[in-house]
């Protein structure tokens, strides 16, 4: 089965950017300049309305396929369809202008169709009129992408697409005829321009960069993002097709190979807090770089440690405290006795060990579904507690201090939506955090990983880390969004299947 797509990986807090101008300059690069809008209550509300839990693809034969259920499927991730970085493109001849999100977490291009009659969103945005284009080619293949609270339906067409001053001919794209989601009503974008790999493209439509490559429109098989995180700057950033702008980064790029095509996925190492290991990804984790995600989304086990270190506040987890209270001493004793960490929770009876890692007990009946849900939470809490206690044992802490530390981390678990707030006045006192990529550390300062939200004339500070759990074998998984891409100029090299990072300038 071909991997399924998801559109615009997910975050609750969003940055809106608009295209100022785009064109091919004297150095042969196609530049798209972006401007930036501050976070505000309106965009926050739009993001919350867009929060999704399920995504299904309906085939033309009427069957529905849940993402990630097959071993070959891409991981289903919560989808917020962020209105982040967007700009203007032209579809057809003469060009019909549309505002689209530039999203490395999806691969399709879609815009509203003039044949969209029954969706409010279509009446609030620009619509593509095939009869007005001299280069239009009929395709007609239908598709439906369903979300937990809405869906997009439409059909494929082919036409010329203008990006800056480049004309991509015969580009296959989706004309939407139904947009049943509040996201598309509130959103300030007309459609999405996906920059992921063809493996997650609906209908086998080539992403725009692949068409540029095949039509020899760009000098190098790369595109690069520079995101300006200065809240007072007028320029929000720059997207370059065919090369990089050297004035936007320092030193040389460090490259990591793409390990799984579909999303821009690679292998990363540990996350360090003030130079010290958080343990959970010391043996490696998967990561995805996504321009459609505002924050850094990662395993709850690590995010809780980050929140503890930076003083972030979330909802107290009853299950977590229960595990520490009832099983903390037992977990500590088992680890001291050299019990394999992956087996601790199964030996206690909170999880089931499948040979490589602990999983929640899958045996259930109709009357026990609520109990099963509780046991899942206890299993997760146990696994986190094992990691926390193991870290403290390495530091030769006393039993009392170890259990006290674990209990404090329980209090720092994020809210159900994954987000946590911090004290804006304490930012200068927070530690540096660092990701390990290609055996090098990529540091984020507090000023870089704390996001400021404007609300009712006041500034609220949000932790740039959001809880997001993907179980093995797909996970643990990190999503490095704009918080990371703002600190590090990012090159997406589809010619060599690699991703490069260098300090932004």
Image (tube, rainbow, N blue to C red):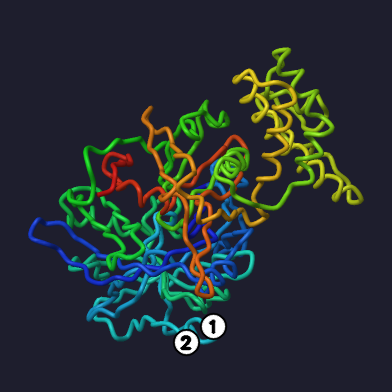
Q: Secondary structure at mark 1?
A: loop
Give the label on residue 21, or none.
Answer: none
Residue found at the very far top of the displayed protein: 337
The quarter of the picture where residue 257 lies is: top left
Q: Residue at x 57, y 38 (%)?
A: 475
Residue 68 position within the rendered picture, expressed as x and y whole percent measured from the top left: 59, 47
Total numbered labels placed on residues in the image: 2
**Does residue 370 appear to the left or right of 34 in the view shown?**
right
Q: Residue at x 59, y 41 (%)?
A: 299
Residue 229 position within the rendered picture, expressed as x and y whole percent measured from the top left: 35, 57
| Label 2 to label 1: alpha-carbon separation | 7 Å
* Callout 2–callout 1 Cβ contact below 8 Å: yes
Q: Residue at x 47, y 75 (%)?
A: 187
Decide: is 310 above or below 231: above
192 vs 329, nearest the viewer: 329
Residue found at the very far left of the displayed protein: 26
Q: Counting other residues with Cα less than 10 Å from the Cα at mark 1, is it few (<14), some (14-19), or many (20 or more)?
A: some
Residue found at the very far right of the displayed protein: 367
Residue with the mark numbered 2: 123
Q: Counting other residues with Cα less than 10 Å from the Cα at mark 2, is it few (<14), some (14-19), or many (20 or more)?
A: some
Q: Residue at x 63, y 58 (%)?
A: 54
Residue 168 position within the rendered picture, expressed as x and y whole percent measured from the top left: 24, 65
276 vs 37, nearest the viewer: 276
Q: Secondary structure at mark 2?
A: helix
The quarter of the picture where residue 278 lies is: top right
**Does residue 43 appear to the left or right of 401 in the view shown?**
left
**Does residue 144 appear to the left or right of 163 in the view shown?**
right
Residue with the mark numbered 1: 119
Residue 238 position within the rendered picture, expressed as x and y whole percent measured from the top left: 26, 59
């Amino acid at each position: 089965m071909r991997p399924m797509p998801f559109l615009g990986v997910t975050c609750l807090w969003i940055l809106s950017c608009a295209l100022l101008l785009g064109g091919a300059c004297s150095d042969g690069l196609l530049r798209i300049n972006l401007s930036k809008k501050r976070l505000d209550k309106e965009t926050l509300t739009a993001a919350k309305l867009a929060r999704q839990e399920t995504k299904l693809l309906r085939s033309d034969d009427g069957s529905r396929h849940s993402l990630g259920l097959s071993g070959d499927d891409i991981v289903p991730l919560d989808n917020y369809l962020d209105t982040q970085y967007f700009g203007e493109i032209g579809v057809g001849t003469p060009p019909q202008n549309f505002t689209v999100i530039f999203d490395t977490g999806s691969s399709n291009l879609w815009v509203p169709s003039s044949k969209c009659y029954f969706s409010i969103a279509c009446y609030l945005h620009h619509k593509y009129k095939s009869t007005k284009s001299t280069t239009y080619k009929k395709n007609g293949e239908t598709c439906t992408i369903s979300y937990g609270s809405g869906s997009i339906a439409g059909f494929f067409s082919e036409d010329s697409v203008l990006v800056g001053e480049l004309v991509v001919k015969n580009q296959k794209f989706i004309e939407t005829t139904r947009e049943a989601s509040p996201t598309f009503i509130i959103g300030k974008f007309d459609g999405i321009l996906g920059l992921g790999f063809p493996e997650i493209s609906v209908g086998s439509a080539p992403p725009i960069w692949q068409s540029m490559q095949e039509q020899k429109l760009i000098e190098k098989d790369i595109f690069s993002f520079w995101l300006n995180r200065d809240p007072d700057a007028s320029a929000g950033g720059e997207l370059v097709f065919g090369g990089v702008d050297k004035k936007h980064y320092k030193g040389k790029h460090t490259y990591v190979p793409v390990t799984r095509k579909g999303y821009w996925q690679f292998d990363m190492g540990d996350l360090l807090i003030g130079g010290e290991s958080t343990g959970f990804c010391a043996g490696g984790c998967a990561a995805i770089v996504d321009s459609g995600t505002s924050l850094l989304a990662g395993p709850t086990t690590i995010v809780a440690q980050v929140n503890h270190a930076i003083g972030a506040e979330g909802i107290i987890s009853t299950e977590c405290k229960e595990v520490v209270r009832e099983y903390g001493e037992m977990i500590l004793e088992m680890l001291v006795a050299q019990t394999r960490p992956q087996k601790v929770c199964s030996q206690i009876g909170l999880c089931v060990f499948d040979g490589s890692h602990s999983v929640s007990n899958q045996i259930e009946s109709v009357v026990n579904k609520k109990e099963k849900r509780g046991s899942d939470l206890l299993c997760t809490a146990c696994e986190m507690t094992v990691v926390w206690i193991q870290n403290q044992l390495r530091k030769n802490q006393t039993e009392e201090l170890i259990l006290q530390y674990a209990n404090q981390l329980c209090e720092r678990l994020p809210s159900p939506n994954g987000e946590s707030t911090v004290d804006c006045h304490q930012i200068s006192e927070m530690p540096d955090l660092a990701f390990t990529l290609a055996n090098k550390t990529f540091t984020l300062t507090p000023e870089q990983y704390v996001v400021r939200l404007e609300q009712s004339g006041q500034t609220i500070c949000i932790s740039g880390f959001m809880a997001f759990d993907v179980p093995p074998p797909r996970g643990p998984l990190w999503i490095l969004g704009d918080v990371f891409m703002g600190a590090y100029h990012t090159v997406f090299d589809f010619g060599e299947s690699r991703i490069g990072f260098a300090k932004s300038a």
